[in-house]
Image (cartoon, grey):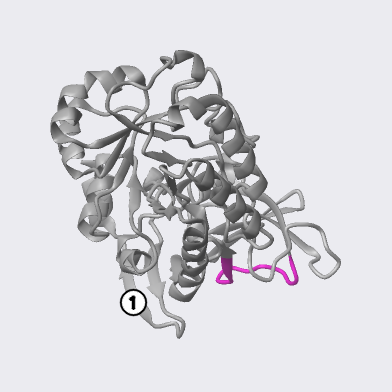
Amino acid sequence: MAQFTLFEDRIRQNLELVADVASAADVRIILALKAFAYWPAFPIFAEYLTGATASSLNEAKLIQQHFGKAPHVYAPAYRPHEFEEMLGIAGHLTFNSLSELERYRPFWEKEGTSVGLRVNPEYSPVETDLYNPADPHGRLGETLPNLPARPPAGLKGLHVHTLCESTAANTATLVERVRAQFGHYLEEMEWLNLGGGHLMTKAGYDIDALIKTLSDLRARYPHLEIILEPGSAMVWQAGTLDCTVLDVINNYGHKTALLDVSFTCHMPDTLEMPYRPQLTGVSDKPHKNYPYAYRLGGMSCLAGDYLADYYFPHPLRAGDKLVFEDMAHYTTVKSTVFNGVPHPDVALVDADGEELSRRSFNYDDYEKRMG
């Protein structure tokens, strides 16, 4: 049976580093649910983090109920019939546009919510268009020419998000870009949210450079609360997806191993980013010690539900087990029920392999999803 396995000890190792950065730089670092929302693990995160951030009413309610904190909230647009409930839950609430900020002004002014505005500094190191939020003609945030000379009355914060699994140097460039374009606003704000994409738990990341960048920013604007909301960094290399070979197809000498998981259903970033995952004990490039090449095929009927060749030390047969590594972030939150493909179990285990929680999925889940 296919299964996402989340490892408590690896999550804690990441969170300890994140908490150390937050303390050293005197900033707030919170969990972004868009990358990881397995709420049975929230008590672990709550030991190290002061909160979490939501991009929908569902995420906000999940934070409220299972994290026990008022969520930071940002959405590209708010649905009118949900807005008052969202406002009642949110600690900070960010608008995507000046027009929406003004449209809902009577509500947030009455509630006294700390509101922010997303701005687009028109800088991002992300090269894949699908994941690049800094397009000057895009829909995410206001660009500098749209802003009035002085901040709108009641505006408390600015929000930027332009990074994706990025380096400390990228964060430094982002901060300089924000200061250059929006420094006159920062003088009058109470908080600045630098969004996600700060992959500080990846091996080789320059932690000292990140702390210096954030500390310098705090020194320049001592009145500002600085917030980061990474997602991937919290659970980087903290989970796997275990699966089984169901069959092997050989067409004109090109072999495909069909698995009991789906790339389009369970690992969509592998097709969208594109992101090439690692498998335990397997090479993703030709190698003399891994002479057997197989395309890996998902179990949906989408023609493109496959990854190009991986290289194995031995021939694959039905029943063989494979383990995809680094499968905690942007997996279960993005999975679908396309084709009715069974969803893998999700299990959280401790350092001894003992299960702390498990979620299994069956026909009833699929039926309720469909009607």
Residue named by callout 1: 356
* Residue in the image at 55% along x and 49% along y: 214
* Residue in the image at 22% along x and 53% along y: 64
Quadrant containing the C terminus in the rendered view: top left
Residue type indicated by callout 1: Leu
Please state if 224 lies on the left or on the right of 168 as rendered.
left
Q: Where does the magenta region start and end?
A: 312-323
Q: Can residue 25 be seen in this view?
A: yes
Please state if 189 lies on the left or on the right of 260 as rendered.
left
Extreme residue in the right direction: 288
Callout 1: 10 Å neighbours few (<14), some, many (20+)? Answer: some
Name the one closer to the observer, 235 or 312: 235
Percent coordinates x, y for residue 134 in the rendering = 55, 28
Quadrant containing the N terminus in the rendered view: bottom left
Percent coordinates x, y for residue 176 in the rendering = 61, 35
* Residue in the image at 60% along x and 44% along y: 171
* Residue in the image at 33% along x and 55% along y: 51
Percent coordinates x, y for residue 160 in the rendering = 47, 35
Please state if 355 lies on the left or on the right of 314 as rendered.
left
Residue 239 vertical position relative to residue 371 in the rendered view, above or below: below
Q: Is residue 268 visible?
A: no
Which secondary structure, mark 1?
strand
Please state if 199 lies on the left or on the right of 250 as rendered.
left
Name the one closer to the observer, 242 or 67: 67
Q: Main secondary structure of the magenta part?
A: loop
Q: How many dots with numbers? A: 1
254 in the magenta segment: no
